[in-house]
Structure formats: C-alpha cells, structure tokens
Amino acid sequence: MLPIRWWKRFRSAPRSSTVVDKTIAVEVAYALPQKQKIIGLVVPEGTSALEAARLSRMGEHFPGLDIENSAMGIFGKTVPKPAERQLKAGERVEIYRALIADPKEVRKQRAAKAKEAKAEEAKQG
C-alpha cells in the first residue's frame, strides 16, 4: 500500500520544535587540589561563558567561589571577557582559582636554593 500524497507533505514539514530556540550542550569545570567537579549543561545557543558558569551553580559545591570575579577559560585558553564570549556546542568552561604565589618568584627562590646547594657541595668536595 502506498502512502497517501498529502501525508508526504506533512511528514516533511518542519516540526514545531524547530520554532523553539536551539540549545547546545556545554560543560563547566572547577577544581581544587583535593576535589574537582565538571557539570554538564544544556543551554540556549548564544549563552556566554559567564552565564554558563552561573547556571552551573558551582558555588553550591565550592562555598566561597566567586564566579563573578573569577578568571575563566575554554579548554585551557584564557577568555579575557567571559561575559562576552558566546559558547559553541561541546565547549568546556573552566573557572580558574587565583594563584597562591607568583610563579616567577617561586622559580627565583628555587634557583637561589639550588645555587646555594651547589656552592655548598663545591666547598665540601
């Protein structure tokens, strides 16, 4: 039995769900040395990195986290203005912690200690 002609027209017509805004799947990640959390979200297309971070409610898992003032990135690359960066499907927003110590200073201190240790060995040997 062949399908009715009018049925073919309706079957290929756009569904009502295409009228609704499109959504994308993204992830939001935050980590401490002892704990990490990655939250998957489905958000409207055009959502910013900052909006996704807010929607993740990451602050409930990490009390004291200040999402509004935290640096953010996407897949390890810093985003200078998270409120303006629109997300694409599959992207992961990373909320960064503030540095405890300046990496340059830590390297200088480590180099100074190594230099002292080397000088001490030279005196003894």
Image (cartoon, rainbow, N blue to C red):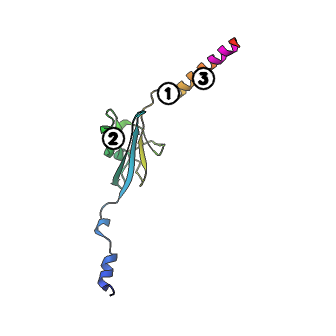
Secondary structure, mark 2, is helix
Q: Nearer the viewer, residue 64 or 84?
A: 64
Q: Dot 2 corresponds to which residue? A: 58
Q: Is residue 106 above or below residue 56?
A: above
58 within the magenta span: no
Image spot of residue 91 (x, y percent): 43, 50
Residue range in magenta is: 116-122
Magenta stretch, overall SS: helix
Q: Is residue 6 above or below residue 112?
A: below
Q: Is residue 45 visible?
A: no
Q: Which mark is residue 122?
A: none
Q: Dot 3 corresponds to which residue? A: 111
Q: Nearer the viewer, residue 6 or 34?
A: 34
Q: Nearer the viewer, residue 82 or 2?
A: 2
Three-letter amino acid code at the position of disc 3 = Ala
Three-letter amino acid code at the position of disc 2 = Met
**Badge 2 or badge 3: first in the primary sequence:** 2
User: Could you tell me how far apart the alpha carbons at marks 2 and 3 are, in whole angstroms?
Assistant: 38 Å
Locate the C terminus by quadrant: top right
